[in-house]
Amino acid sequence: MNIDAYLHQVHAATVRLRDIVSSINSVVENSINKKIDEIKKMLLFDTQLALSRVWSVDKFVELQIKSIDAQGRKLHEGIKEVENALQVLQLIKLISGFFVLGLIMLFIDTQWTLTRYLLPIFSILFLAQ
C-alpha cells in the first residue's frame, strides 16, 4: 500500500472514530441532562399526600417521613446514575484519546520507517541510474 492510501485510511478511521465518539457523547450527555432535570424537579415533601385530607400530627409526620425516605432513595439512585454516566463519558474520552495517540504513533513510526529505510534505498536506486 502506498503512503497516500495509508494516510487516507488513517484519516478515514479518525473521522469515523470522531463521529462515533460524538454520537456516544451526545447520547450520554442527553441521558445525564435528562436525569439532572428529573432530579431538579424532585420534591422530598409530598404535597399531594399532605393536602389529600386532614391528618393527625403523628400520622402526618409518619407518612411524610416514609415519603421523604422513598424520595431520598430515588434521589440517591438518580445521583448514582449521573455519576456512572459521567464516568462512562470520561472513559470514552480517554479511550478515544489513546486511539488517536496510537494512530499518531503509528504514523510517526511509518514516517520513521520511510525516512530510515526506504528513502536511502530509493536514493541509491535513482543515483545509480
Image: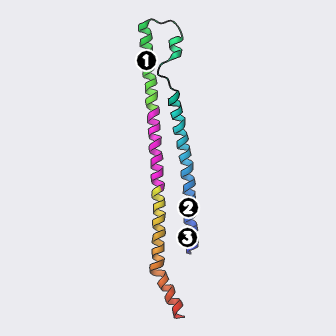
Coordinates of residue 94 in the picture (x, y in percent): 45, 52
- Tell me the number on the disc at residue 25: none
Q: CA distance from mark 2 to mark 1?
A: 54 Å
- Tag 1 or tag 3, which sits nearer the N-term? 3
In the rendered structure, which segment of residues is drawn in magenta? 78-96
Q: Is residue 120 above or below residue 47?
A: below
In the picture of the structure, the residue carrying the numbered disc 1 is 66
Residue 43 colored magenta? no
Neighbourhood count class around disc 1 (C-alpha, 10 Å): few under 14, some 14–19, many 20 upward: few
Amino acid type shown at disc 1: Lys
In the picture of the structure, the residue carrying the numbered disc 3 is 6
Give the residue drawn at x 56%, y 50%. Answer: 22
Quarter occupied by the N terminus: bottom right
Quarter occupied by the C terminus: bottom right
- Tag 3 or tag 2, which sits nearer the N-term? 3
Provide the secondary structure element on which disc 2 rests. helix
Provide the secondary structure element on which disc 1 rests. helix
In the picture of the structure, the residue carrying the numbered disc 2 is 13
Coordinates of residue 64 in the picture (x, y in percent): 44, 15
Q: Nearer the viewer, residue 4 or 37?
A: 37
